[in-house]
Amino acid sequence: MAFLQEPEPQRGTLLSVLPGISRIVARNPGVMTYHGTNTYFIEAEGGISILDPGPNDAQHVADILAAAGGKKITRLLLTHSHYDHMGAAPALQQVTGAPIAAFHESGLEGYTADIALFDNSELAGFTAVHTPGHAPDHLCYQLILPDGCKILFSGDHVMSWSSSVVSPPSGDMLAYYRSLEKVIARDDVFYLPGHGPVLPEPQNLAAQLLAHRQKREDAIMAALRVQGWSIAALAAQLYAKADPALKVAATRNVLAHMLKLKAEGVVVENAPDPNLHPDIASLPQRPPGPLPPGVTQAIIDQSRADTRRRFTLRGAAYSVMT
Ligand SMILES: [Zn+2]
């Protein structure tokens, strides 16, 4: 996929993105966050809108306040309620008094935004676009620049540097597909993501992300047409060549697809068999290198097939609807 990279950005300072828009990259680099969360500054007549305040890091909050200089921060917009995007919101609100705008049903239990947004809500030049999938309360925000250029703050829905995590129960693969189709059908010229650099020709990458998920779903369906599978067994089968460190993510991903297929009535979840031991953690993986003496590939294959069969019969197996 045509992901973009960028050198590590300067910290603690405003970096210009597009006319009237700049960002501070928070000091939370990581495997899920790339160089860190993008906290966007959007200048308007009344003051500055901050989109995604970032993680609750005192230095990041101080950087934001310093970057605003004497200018008034008039509102805080959230793409979604994950900590790396909204953690700094309470601290910033305490200093600035700015109201927090977010989707009307928060992904955080018991949390209510000061300004409750819906799909298509308009606020200070922004139009909210409800895009659940990565998170149920995920909003993208469209802004039309003075020259007519349409941009979309795409949060974690579509990111330039990586695909999004869709992990149930808050992640919803069916919603994610619909939300990708939703943004692909729009004519935004640039996406400004929650992590990573500006994304030009954004519909191309969004379409690739959708095709990639569809390919994975096709592989799942092909396996299910042969036999029933449990989530763990199917993940071990489909991601056999992947880094073992990604095993948990792979399992969550297969589960997300399976719940989508179940919701669509394509796949059925079978009742668990109470007679089988439920605790088979994973398929055995042969260490790289030559086979140990006395062990043939046929023995390994048989052992794997046997384990796979047991996985198949393990609780909560899935099969194709007939
Ligand atoms: Zn997120």
Image (cartoon, rainbow, N blue to C red):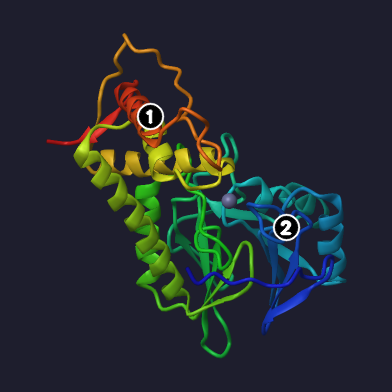
**What percent of the width, then of the height, locates residue 263?**
27, 40
- Tell me the crowding category of disc 1: few under 14, some 14 to 19, or many 20 or more residues within 10 angstroms, Cα based: few
Q: Residue at x 66, y 55 (%)?
A: 33
Helix or strand or loop: what does disc 1 sit on?
helix
Helix or strand or loop: what does disc 2 sit on?
loop
Q: Earlier in the sequence, mark 1 or mark 2?
A: 2
* Circle 1 or circle 2, nearest the eye: 1
Q: Does ligand 1 reach within 8 Å of label 1's beta carbon?
A: no
Tell me the kind of residue under disc 1. Ile
Nearer the observer, 297 or 284: 297
**What percent of the width, then of the height, locates residue 215?**
33, 57
Does residue 260 appear left or right of residue 161 in this picture? left
Does residue 297 appear left or right of residue 157 in this picture? left
The answer to whether the residues at label 1 and label 2 have Cβ atoms under 8 Å apart is no
**What percent of the width, then of the height, locates residue 154?**
53, 65
Nearer the observer, 83 or 278: 278
Tell me the kind of residue under disc 2. Ala
On the question of residue 58 being in view, the answer is yes
Q: Residue furthest left?
A: 322
Q: Residue at x 53, y 66 (%)?
A: 141
Q: Residue 277, relative to residue 321: is it above or below?
A: above
On the question of residue 136 being in view, the answer is no
Q: Residue at x 69, y 59 (%)?
A: 37
Query: Which residue in the protein does label 1 denote?
Result: 299
Query: Which residue in the protein does label 2 denote?
Result: 98
Nearer the observer, 272 or 145: 272
Q: Residue at x 61, y 47 (%)?
A: 82
Q: Residue furthest bottom?
A: 147
Q: Residue furthest front?
A: 293
**What percent of the width, then of the height, locates residue 142?**
51, 71
